[in-house]
Image: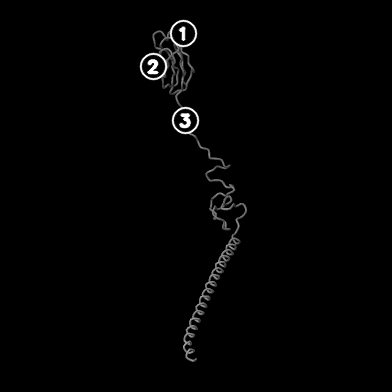
Amino acid sequence: MRLPAIRSLPLLCLLCLFGGASVALATSVHRSRERSSHAAQACRRHARHRHCASHRKHKRDAGSKPSAPKGVSKGGSSSGASTGPWTGAPGPVIPGAGSGSGSGSSPSSPAGGGAAPTETPAAPAGPVHVQVTAEDSNGYHFILSRTSVPAGPVVIEFVNHGQDEHNIHAVEPAEGTEAGGLKENVQPGAHTDLTLNLHAGSYTLFCSLPGHEAKGMKATLAVE
């Protein structure tokens, strides 16, 4: 009876070793899982703690930010203030700069705030115009739109309302010299301009065609 007991002893020892190894392995796996679970919970707690701390810091920063003074819009500024974000300190004062209320005046502006008057240069005087109309239907004569003009350049607008051709010449009787005249006759219904430079005096305007001046086709123009 002792021989079978002795033979089964190594088998029992072997079973005990396998059983102990299995228990140790199971215990190690269980502890590893517990450590992993504890690490995960700690990570989640740490993440929640950081989020809460960041949220509390954001609330403290928002509560400690100075508010803009009345009259200053968000992101803007009141009249005369800097356009940057409000810092609670007044902007630098620039010597000679006008205030936002408009109480000062620009050095170049006259008293009263109006614009400085500008002098417009006088336009150069142009030549004087005189219309001379030739008529021959009821006698030969010249009709003048004006009988006197200032000395200087004069434009004679000669219009032929007659049935015959006519011309015009200007002569100063005191000197007996001709101031100028048309080189060609003007046909009935036509008109042309004659520019003369006249000095003070009295001028006779007449048609130089034979017999026309004697029939009355003449007039006097006074130059002052």
Residue 49 picture location, percent across and down: 57, 68
Whole-angstrom CA distance, mark 3 to mark 1, is 42 Å
Q: Nearer the viewer, residue 133 or 7?
A: 7
Give the answer, above or below, for where 129 lies relative to 49.
above
**Amino acid type of the residue tagged 3 in the rendering:** Ala
Give the answer, above or below, for where 23 lies relative to 210.
below
Whole-angstrom CA distance, mark 2 to mark 3, is 30 Å
Q: Earlier in the sequence, mark 1 or mark 2?
A: 1
> Does residue 218 appear to the left or right of 95 in the view shown?
left
> Does residue 134 appear to the left or right of 183 in the view shown?
right
**Amino acid type of the residue tagged 2 in the rendering:** Leu
Q: Which residue is mark 2?
A: 182
Q: Earlier in the sequence, mark 3 or mark 1?
A: 3
**Amino acid type of the residue tagged 1 in the rendering:** Ser
| Furthest-right residue in this view | 70
Badge 1: residue crowd in 10 Å (few <14, some 14–19, many ≥20) = few
Q: Nearer the viewer, residue 9 or 223?
A: 9
| Furthest-front residue in this view | 1
Quadrant of the rendered structure where residue 60 is?
bottom right
> Does residue 14 appear to the left or right of 98 in the view shown?
left
| Furthest-bottom residue in this view | 2
Q: Which residue is mark 1?
A: 137
Assign a secondary structure to mark 1. loop
Q: Which residue is mark 3?
A: 123
